[in-house]
Amino acid sequence: SEQAVIKTEPLDVNDNNSEDDEEEVKVQIDPSQIQVKVSAEELNRRIEAFISRKRDQNNMFNIQEFCSHQHFENEDENSCARVDAIVIARKDSKSHVK
């Protein structure tokens, strides 16, 4: 069966940048086990998009959870739920904040 070879960068455990101490590590992997077959650049783009999307989702959740106002596009762009948070008294709340 055909094998995919993945080259990894050597682990520098002593912060010594000497080229003589580095060994190239090759790991053989069955190609049928590889799920994402894209370039490193595309993979990094996808990871950044995922992180950005999750940050936006968390920010919107925090706005809904902690702020009494709705998020509008014309609000301060440098603002976020963590900064704009205000205390909302809720019935039967066990919060230590009063």
Image (cartoon, helix red, strand yellow):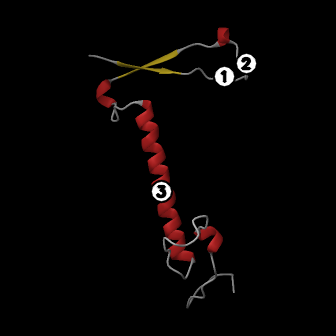
Q: Residue placed at 54% from the left, 14% from the top? A: 24
Is residue 80 toward the left or the right of residue 17 in the image? left
Residue 91 position within the rendered picture, expressed as x and y whole percent measured from the top left:
55, 91
The answer to which quarter of the image holds residue 98 is: bottom right
Whether residues under marks 1 and 3 lie with C-beta atoms below 8 angstroms apart, the answer is: no
Q: In 3D space, how far apart are the residues under numbered discs 1 and 3 (Cα atoms)?
A: 32 Å
* Point 55% across, 72% down: residue: 75
Sequence-earlier tag: 2 or 3: 2
Q: Judge the density around disc 1: few (<14), some (14-19), many (≥20) Cα neighbours within 10 Å.
A: few
Q: Is residue 95 left or right of residue 51?
A: right
Percent x, y for residue 92?
56, 89
Which residue has dot 2 on it? Answer: 16
* Label 1 SS: loop
Dot 2, crowdedness within 10 Å: few (<14), some or many (≥20)?
A: few
- The amino acid type found where label 2 is placed reads Asn
Up-down relation of residue 95 to residue 46 (above or below): below
Q: Residue 20's spot in the image, x, y percent?
A: 66, 8
Residue that appears at 53% across and 81% down: 69
- Marks 2/3: CA distance? 37 Å
- Are the residues tagged 2 and 1 within 8 Å (C-beta)? yes
Report which residue position mark 1 lands on.
Answer: 12
The quarter of the rendered structure image containing the N terminus is: top left
Q: Label 2, label 1: how many angstroms apart (C-alpha)?
A: 7 Å
Report the mark closest to the observer, 2 or 3: 3
Circle 2/circle 3 CB separation < 8 Å:
no
Residue depth check, mark 1 versus mark 3: number of the one nearer the observer? 3
Amino acid, disc 3: Lys
N-terminal of the two: label 1 or label 3? 1
Q: Mark 2: which secondary structure?
A: loop
Q: Position of residue 23 (x, y in %)?
A: 58, 13
Q: Which mark is residue 54?
A: 3
